[in-house]
Structures are given as structure tokens and as C-alpha cells.
Image (cartoon, rainbow, N blue to C red):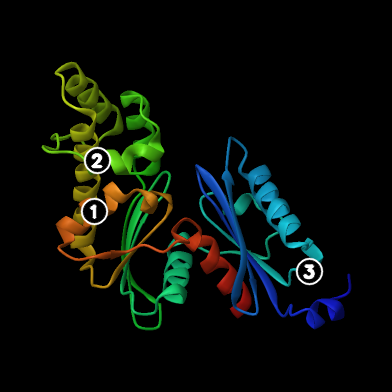
């Protein structure tokens, strides 16, 4: 299919952003600055193959090939494994760009991913002013929640709703994933309800986020990005400590890839 034919059918400058995370690989395609498609798959053990697969599947759904893409930008921990990307950009810059694109009133971003978490403060143009990041351990991340879900024998997708039923959230004092898992097992043995334990896990994550937020002077409005943003229990726990609502887009999980696609269009 020729480029001219694409233009006649309403295709303009087509860019692609990729976010290769430790748990999921995401891709977003923009057409003239409009989101036309996104895709999320599990990364698995090979980040390079996951990057290729998520792009191939998304382009196939849209009836496109790599030849139709003018520019590709990759982000995420596996961004350097993507050989066909034109450039790579940090997750912090991409999440800031994506969040600002979706809502330009946002001044702070809480991004909880698979293996790290970040609090990013941006200005009215979407430029990063300051940030704090936890990348030293998996505590309070998506991986942390996966470990807790296995210990509790609960589907991770059920975590959010179950935590809302809690009447007395358990106290999870350890910030280390290994020790926190031991705490959870001990609470189970004592007969604590799953709802209360899960709510306690969410509160421990929120407390960790607030510790980072205090270092950068988080400002409202706040948007949450990353896969953990789909967990209503974590969002509610953060809102209570912030004493302020947190915005969550339906595209929360792909905001990093979205930011990468926007940067591809700008450069």
C-alpha cells in the first residue's frame, strides 16, 4: 500500500512508542497526534522478542507494517534491546510527556511499574521539574503485588476490590518484599482476613509512595500511571494519604509508550 493511499484514507504522520517493562511490553501508535491503537503483552524472559512481538501484533491489528512508521522511540528497562527503534528515552521523560498529553492540568505523576516506582513533578508545559525513584528493590511495585497475591492465593486482578471490603487493615511494617511476604504468611496463620491483609499491603505501598512524594514536593492535580494504577485499592490508599483525588486514565498502563510515540512525532 503506498503512502499516498494512506494519506487519502486519513493517515498522516505515523509514529510508534514502545515501553518494554519487566512485566509487560506496551506499544502505542499515533496518527497525526491521535492515538489509533495500543497493545499490552507480557514481557517474559526475552525483552527484545517481547518488543518485536508487541509491535508486530499492534501493527497487524491496524493493517500497518514497519514501513509505514516514520519514527519509533523506545523506553522502559528493556528499551536498549529494541534494535529497530530510532532512539531511546527515559521512562521519566516519557511518562511526563504522556500524562501531560492526556491532561495538561496534571502537575505530578505517580508511576508504579513492575520493578520500580517514581514520583515525578512537572510544570505547565509537561517538562520534568523534579523526581524521586525507588529502583533498589521491588517493594511496593507490581512484582511486589504479584508475590503477595501468590502468598494469599488470590488472583491479582481481585486485589483492588477485595481490599475495599476491609474493616481493619493489617499492619505490614516491612518494606522488603521477602520480609513482607513472611509477615503476610504470619498474618494468615493468625487468622487475619484476606481483605484486611490486602488493604494493609496497599497501605504499605501508599506509605512508600508518600515518602518519595515528600522528597520532591508533590503538587496537585496528581495522575497515576503504570499497571498498578488499575488497582483501585492502591489508588484509594494513596488518595487517603494525599488527602486529594488521583486521576487515573483508561490508558494508564500505556502512558509511557504514549509519551514515547509523542516524542517520536516531535523529533
Quarter-wise, where is residue 114 in the image?
top left
The x and y percentages for residue 37 are: 63, 63
Q: Is residue 239 visible?
A: yes
Q: Where's the C terminus, which quadrant?
A: bottom right
Helix or strand or loop: what does disc 1 sit on?
helix
Circle number at residue 236: 1
Helix or strand or loop: what does disc 3 sit on?
helix
Name the outermost residue toward the front. Answer: 165
Residue plotted at (24% across, 72% down): 220
Q: How dense is the environment of label 3, judged by Cα within 10 Å: few (below 14), some, or many (20 and up)?
A: some
The reply to whether the C-beta atoms of the residues labelled 2 and 3 are less than 8 Å apart is no
Residue plotted at (14% across, 38% down): 169
Q: Is residue 143 visible?
A: no
Apparent side of residue 228 relative to residue 13 in the rendered image (left or right)? left
Name the residue beneath numbered marker 3. Answer: 68
**Nearer the observer, disc 2 or disc 3?**
2
| Number of numbered callouts drawn | 3
Label 1, label 3: how far apart the Cα atoms are: 42 Å
The x and y percentages for residue 25 are: 57, 49
Q: Where's the N terminus, which quadrant?
A: bottom right
Q: How dense is the environment of label 1, judged by Cα within 10 Å: few (below 14), some, or many (20 and up)?
A: many
Q: How dense is the environment of label 2, judged by Cα within 10 Å: few (below 14), some, or many (20 and up)?
A: many
Label 1, label 2: how far apart the Cα atoms are: 10 Å
The reply to whether the C-beta atoms of the residues labelled 1 and 3 are less than 8 Å apart is no
Circle number at residue 163: 2
Residue plotted at (48% across, 66% down): 94
Helix or strand or loop: what does disc 2 sit on?
helix
Amino acid at each position: 500500500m503506498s503512502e499516498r493511499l494512506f494519506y487519502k484514507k486519513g493517515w498522516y504522520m505515523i509514529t510508534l512508542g514502545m515501553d518494554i517493562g519487566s512485566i509487560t511490553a506496551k506499544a502505542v501508535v499515533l496518527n497525526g497526534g491521535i492515538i489509533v491503537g495500543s497493545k499490552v503483552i507480557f514481557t517474559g524472559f526475552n525483552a527484545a522478542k517481547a518488543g518485536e512481538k508487541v509491535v508486530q501484533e499492534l501493527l497487524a491489528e491496524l493493517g500497518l507494517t514497519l514501513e509505514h512508521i516514520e519514527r519509533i522511540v523506545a523506553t522502559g528497562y528493556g528499551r536498549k534491546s529494541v534494535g529497530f527503534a530510532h532512539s531511546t528515552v527515559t521512562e521519566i521523560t516519557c511518562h511526563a510527556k504522556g500524562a501531560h498529553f492526556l491532561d495538561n492540568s496534571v502537575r505530578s505523576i505517580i508511576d508504579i511499574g513492575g520493578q520500580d516506582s517514581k514520583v515525578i513533578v512537572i510544570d505547565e508545559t509537561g517538562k520534568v521539574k523534579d523526581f524521586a525513584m525507588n529502583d533498589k528493590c521491588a517493594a511496593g511495585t507490581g512484582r511486589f503485588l504479584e508475590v503477595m497475591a501468590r502468598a494469599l492465593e488470590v488472583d491479582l486482578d481481585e486485589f483492588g476490590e477485595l481490599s475495599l471490603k476491609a474493616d481493619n487493615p493489617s499492619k505490614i511494617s516491612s518494606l522488603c518484599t521477602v520480609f513482607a511476604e513472611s509477615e503476610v504468611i504470619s498474618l494468615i496463620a493468625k487468622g487475619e482476613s484476606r481483605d484486611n491483609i490486602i488493604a494493609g499491603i496497599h497501605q504499605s505501598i501508599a506509605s512508600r509512595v508518600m515518602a518519595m512524594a515528600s522528597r520532591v514536593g508533590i503538587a496537585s492535580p496528581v495522575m497515576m500511571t503504570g499497571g498498578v494504577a488499575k488497582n483501585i485499592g492502591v489508588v484509594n490508599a494513596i488518595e487517603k494519604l494525599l488527602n486529594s483525588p488521583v486521576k487515573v486514565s483508561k490508558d494508564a498502563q500505556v502512558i509511557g509508550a504514549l509519551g514515547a510515540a509523542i516524542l517520536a512525532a516531535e523529533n
